[in-house]
Image (cartoon, rainbow, N blue to C red):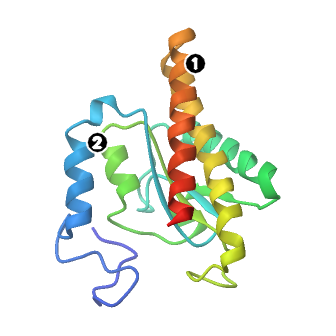
Amino acid sequence: MAVGVSFDCCSNTYPGTKPTSEPEAKAVTDFVGSRKDIFLCFLTIHSYGQLILVPYGHPNYTAPNYNELMMVGKGAAEAIWKVHGMNYTVGASPDVLYANSGSSRDWARMQGIPLTFTFELRDNGTYSFELPEDQIQPTCEEAYSGALHIITYAHDKTFSGAVANAAVTLWSILLAAGVTGATLM
């Protein structure tokens, strides 16, 4: 059952004509779906609201590892706060935002990826989707810190030893390069 969507195609909550009707959604589901067994976590980044959302968007469903998701999400929020003092609220969408259907976060969790989160970046409503230019770089730095916390947790839960530490370093470099590259475009 769809909740929290609008069937007005001009709305920010328009779900499309059917699941994965849009080419971007189809590309993500094809890529992730064909490799779901190797993903340790799945992060989707949106704006705005200063939130870290955990599955599920429907008010009648709770992820089987909800407590772990909340713990990891709160750790990410703390890591974000340490960067520039910005507060992020952690919770399931119906509890902290609104009920919603069709999120990639929920889809990834239903595919068996255990740690799935949505970051709703700055701001908390003053500028909505048009964040001032001087807040873009700090927001990227915060997102990097929160994402690194989640990736490190997923890694440490799954692996151990020197090879594992090298993998975290590599992922950190790739994540930093992606954040830097995105801000230079």
> In the shown orientation, is residue 109 left or right of residue 62?
left
Towards the viewer: 180 or 51: 180
Q: Residue at x 30, y 71 (%)?
A: 2
Towards the viewer: 89 or 62: 89
- The three-letter amino acid code for the residue at tag 2 is Gln
> In the shown orientation, is residue 78 left or right of residue 64?
right
Could you say where residue 146 lies in the image, as x and y percent from the top left?
64, 47
> In the shown orientation, is residue 7 left or right of residue 3?
left
Q: Is residue 50 above or below residue 54?
A: below
For marks 2 and 1, give the one nearer the viewer. Answer: 1
Residue 162, image quadrant: top right
Task: Verify CB contact (< 8 Å) between mark 2 and mark 1.
Answer: no
Residue that badge 2 annotates:
111
Q: Mark 1: which secondary structure?
A: helix
Q: Is residue 136 above or below residue 74?
A: below
Residue that badge 1 annotates:
165
Q: Residue at x 41, y 69 (%)?
A: 100
Residue 14, image quadrant: bottom left
Could you say where residue 25 lies in the image, as x and y percent from the top left?
26, 62
Q: How many marks?
A: 2
Residue farthest along the top direction in this orientation: 161
Residue 36, image quadrant: top left
Could you say where residue 18 lies in the image, as x and y percent from the top left?
17, 71
Say which quadrant the N terminus sits in. bottom left
Q: Mark 2: which secondary structure?
A: loop
N-term-proximal mark, 2 vs 1: 2
Q: Residue at x 63, y 38 (%)?
A: 149
